[in-house]
Structure formats: structure tokens, C-alpha cells
Image (cartoon, rainbow, N blue to C red):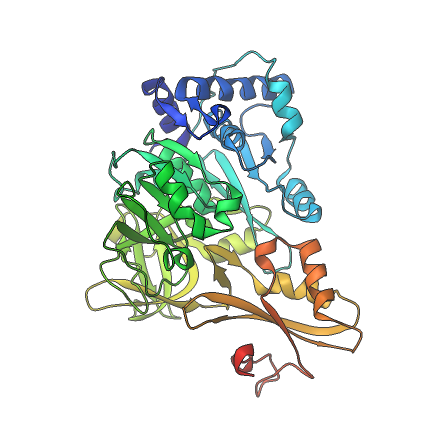
């Protein structure tokens, strides 16, 4: 069994003079040899503070190469990492730090202190079961949920990206996804373990994708990730771009004859890609494809039997656990009933509804429990609803997703409240408590929320606000 630490060390040992990072500014450039020194200095400082293998550290830096260096150092030297975003509300940051048991935060002050530290290259003895990265996603209880991976699951996530060649054009990749999203973690580790050069896409470009073609052309990018909504308007400049990864939500009307587009199906718990499909034409609902290498993908009905339509269940080495949530872990991570068929010990129940086509391809239909996916980020409506219900004057609230005529997903917050409550109040409260991607696009005030014959909330009765 491979471990991610060993894969990283191999890259450092064999590619010393190659550029690990590049960019227009000299400060953005770094060779793999220099990269290895930076990681060893971080290890040296952590050890001087009394930390050792398995201790939990948090990365809280800007969108720069230092963030990725700190992340890589943690993986290489066997620490457990929590990845945080400076743009998150302080309440969410504090919760994640306390929940994971963070002992040291790698921030700007820490990185300044690193400069005077001697590098420590000693890598402890690690196994595939050693914890590595915890990413916090939206939780059904109203609190963020820490999804913890181990050395083995991250290594498998990199190894299963067999659809990516060892060399691709200029071997230069652009990072677009947020560093705290599992798609960003997986994308960077895949690029790093191929010893490609990384260019970090500035947030100004990420937020204005119409500037993306010029940025990719100027940096001779051959490989990157783009959400489906960006791909729909993307028109490449030049011939350097060879492959784009997309997915993490339903992909509609996306295709290019200028470069390959691979639709990847996965989630935080699987460390991104498990099932892939190279898009060959426009689809109303693009297939997710078939599982990669050692993984298995099954469509199961409510009784656990294989069916044409049902819950998508994946087998392989995936999440280690939800931090401090054993019951939730045991609910989704179960013994694999098809171990004799695919050899995998564990099955992950995704909660996604899917359908298997006659040719064996899987297509994604919807969330089993109404969880929302936007731009690859999983959102639990209950977390937003709790914040809305906490606004004085609000008596009830529910969040539901819809699709516009371009196939893009957006959220609407429905609420019951007295006349003192305004949409601006709801928006302001959500911005204070939750990340920006969890802010509904619109709000609709109702006299009462619809219920079914059993008196339970009837989500199906909530209509698209554009049609109300």
C-alpha cells in the first residue's frame, strides 16, 4: 500500500532542479529542491514546538504557494492537517480548530519564524492508516463536519488518476479550485506527484472566469480544473491547453473539440475522483462514467440490492472517519457486501441517486437527502436553515436548490417571519456565520411552509422563485 508521504518524497528526490511553482513574479518561482528545504524548515519549527507525528496543525494562509508548501510539509512529515480559509467567518474557523484538536496554526507569523529555522529532514515511520488531512464541510447538525483522510486514501486518490498521462504538453497546471476544497487538495496532489509545474490562479481570475482564457494562454497551461458553469463560457486561446477536469455536480451541455474534458465523479469522503467519463459530445445529463482501477461503483435499492436506479455506492479506500461523529461515520462507511467481487474492504454510501445505463455507464440524478452541490462544493441546507431561524422574527426556514435554463444550480431560502425581518437581515446574518458559497441567491417569504399529509415539510411543493 502506498502512502502520500512516500510519493511526495520521491518527487523531491528525483526532480530537484525542475520548477515546482511558476508565475510572473520572481517570488512565485520555486524549484523542487527549494520546495523540499521549505518543507523541512516547517518540520523543524513544528518539532521545536514539541509536535511530532500525528499531532494536529492548521493551515491558515492566503491563496499563495506558502499555503501549499505548509500543506505538503504536513503530509510529508506525518502531521494531521486542518485546512482553513482566511475568508471564513471567525466562528467557523474557531469551531474547526477546537473540533480537530489543533495544536499549532501555520499562519503568516509562523512562516516568518520559519525563515530562521534549520531544516529537519527526518520523516517518521508512517503507515497507510496514519491520519493526514481534515476538510470541513457543511454538516446536517448545523455545525461543520470534519472529513478525515489517511495516508493511504490520499495516495490511492493520486494513483487512481490513471486517465492523466505522465506528460501533457508543457506539464504546467493551473490551480483554480479553493485550497480548502477536497477538489483543490486532490488536484494539487495529483499535479505534485507527477512533478508538474504549478501556477496558482489569482482570486481575481477565479471570480472573473472571462479573464481565464488569457491567463491560461499567458502561462502556457496544459491542464486544469473548471466547474461546469465556467466551461460553458470558456473559449481557449492558443493550443497549450490539453485537458480540463470538471464535475462534482451535474454536468449539462458541456463539450469541446479543442481539448479533452473529463467528467469526474467523487466527493469529499472519497478524496474526489472515483468515476470518470471523457466527454465526447453535448449531453443533457453527462454520464459520470465507470470506476477507476481498484474501485467499485454500485447502484443499490433501499434493500441493498443492485438496481437500475438507486443510491450510488462506491468501494475503495476512502474517508477514515468524520471527526468525533462515529454514528455518522458508521452510517455511510460500511463493510463492502461485494468484497468477493472487487476486493475492497469498505463501501461508502454517497446519498446520491444514480442510474446505470445499458452500457454500464452511471449517470447522477439527484441528492437522496436534498443535499446541494454547487461548483463542486457540498452544502447541507440544514446549516443555512439554522442560521436563518436564528434571526429574530423568523419562525421557520428552509433552503432548496433549483436549476436555471443553462443547467446551473442556485439556492433559494424560503422563510416564515414577521414584518420586521428583511432579506438584507437574512443575508447579513448568513455572511457573518457561513462561507460566501453558502449564501442563497434569493429569498422568498411565505405565510407557512408547505407540509404533506403526514404533517412533514413538503420540499417538492416549494417552487422555483422565478415561477412563483
The quadrant of the rendering that contains the N terminus is: top left
Which x, y percent locates residue 6?
A: 38, 26
Which x, y percent locates residue 293?
A: 25, 46
Identify the residue at the far top of this view.
Answer: 118
Which x, y percent locates residue 227?
A: 41, 54
The quadrant of the rendering that contains the C terminus is: bottom right
| 123 or 42: nearer the viewer | 42
For residue 392, which quarter of the picture? bottom right
Which x, y percent locates residue 390?
A: 74, 64
At 34% from the left edge and 21% from the top edge, which residue is drawn? 18
At 40% from the left edge and 39% from the top edge, which residue is drawn? 174
For residue 215, which quarter of the picture? top left
At 50% from the left edge and 30% from the top edge, which residue is drawn? 65
Q: How many marks?
A: 0
Identify the residue at the far left of this view.
Answer: 359
At 30% from the left edge and 70% from the top edge, which residue is drawn? 307
Is 311 positioned to the left or the right of 59 in the image?
Answer: left
Identify the residue at the far bottom of this view.
Answer: 453
Is 366 positioned to the left or the right of 464 in the image?
Answer: left
Is any part of residue 190 visible from this angle? Answer: no
Is any part of residue 375 visible from this angle? Answer: yes
Rendered view: 433 above or below 427: above
Is 359 positioned to the left or the right of 332 in the image?
Answer: left
Amino acid at each position: 500500500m502506498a502512502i502520500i508521504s512516500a510519493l511526495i518524497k520521491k518527487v523531491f528526490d528525483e526532480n530537484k532542479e525542475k520548477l515546482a511553482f511558476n508565475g510572473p513574479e520572481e517570488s512565485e518561482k520555486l524549484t523542487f529542491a527549494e520546495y523540499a528545504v521549505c518543507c523541512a524548515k516547517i518540520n523543524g519549527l513544528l518539532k521545536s514546538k514539541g509536535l511530532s507525528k500525528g499531532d494536529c496543525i492548521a493551515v491558515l494562509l492566503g491563496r499563495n504557494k506558502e499555503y501549499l508548501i505548509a500543506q505538503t510539509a504536513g503530509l510529508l512529515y506525518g502531521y494531521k492537517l486542518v485546512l482553513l480559509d482566511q475568508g471564513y467567518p471567525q466562528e467557523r474557523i474557531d469551531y474547526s480548530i477546537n473540533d480537530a484538536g489543533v495544536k499549532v496554526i501555520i499562519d503568516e507569523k509562523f512562516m516568518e519564524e520559519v525563515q530562521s529555522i534549520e531544516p529537519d529532514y527526518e520523516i517518521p515511520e508512517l503507515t497507510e492508516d496514519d491520519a493526514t488531512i481534515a476538510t470541513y464541510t457543511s454538516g446536517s447538525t448545523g455545525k461543520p463536519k470534519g472529513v478525515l483522510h489517511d495516508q493511504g486514501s490520499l495516495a490511492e486518490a493520486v494513483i487512481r488518476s490513471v486517465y492523466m498521462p505522465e506528460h501533457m504538453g508543457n506539464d504546467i497546471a493551473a490551480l483554480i479550485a479553493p485550497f480548502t476544497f477536497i477538489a483543490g487538495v486532490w488536484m494539487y496532489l495529483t499535479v505534485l506527484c507527477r512533478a508538474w509545474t504549478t501556477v496558482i490562479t489569482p482570486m481575481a481570475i477565479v471570480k472573473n472566469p472571462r479573464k481565464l482564457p488569457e491567463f491560461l494562454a499567458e502561462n502556457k497551461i496544459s491542464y486544469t480544473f473548471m466547474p461546469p458553469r465556467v466551461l460553458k463560457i470558456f473559449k481557449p486561446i492558443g493550443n497549450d491547453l490539453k485537458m480540463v477536469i470538471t464535475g462534482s455536480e451535474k454536468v449539462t451541455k458541456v463539450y469541446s473539440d479543442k481539448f479533452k474534458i473529463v467528467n469526474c465523479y467523487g466527493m469529499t469522503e472519497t478524496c474526489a475522483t472515483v468515476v470518470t467519463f471523457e466527454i465526447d459530445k453535448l449531453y443533457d445529463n453527462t454520464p459520470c462514467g465507470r470506476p477507476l482501477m481498484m474501485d467499485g461503483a454500485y447502484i443499490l435499492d433501499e434493500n441493498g440490492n443492485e438496481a437500475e436506479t438507486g443510491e450510488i455506492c462506491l468501494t475503495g479506500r476512502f474517508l477514515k472517519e468524520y471527526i468525533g461523529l462515529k454514528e455518522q461515520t458508521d452510517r455511510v462507511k460500511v463493510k463492502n457486501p461485494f468484497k468477493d467481487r472487487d476486493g475492497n474492504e469498505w463501501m461508502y454510501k454517497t446519498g446520491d441517486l444514480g442510474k446505470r445505463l445499458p452500457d454500464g455507464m452511471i449517470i447522477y440524478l439527484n441528492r437522496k437527502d436534498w443535499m446541494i452541490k454547487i461548483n463542486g462544493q457540498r452544502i447541507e441546507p440544514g446549516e443555512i436553515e439554522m442560521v436563518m431561524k436564528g434571526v429574530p422574527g423568523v419562525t421557520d426556514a428552509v433552503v432548496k436548490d433549483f436549476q436555471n435554463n443553462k443547467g446551473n444550480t442556485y439556492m433559494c431560502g424560503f422563510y416564515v417571519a414577521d414584518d420586521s425581518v428583511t432579506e438584507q437581515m437574512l443575508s447579513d446574518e448568513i455572511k457573518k456565520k457561513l462561507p460566501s458559497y453558502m449564501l442563497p441567491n434569493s429569498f422568498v417569504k411565505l405565510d407557512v411552509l408547505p407540509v404533506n399529509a403526514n404533517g412533514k415539510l413538503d420540499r417538492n411543493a416549494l417552487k422555483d422563485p422565478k415561477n412563483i
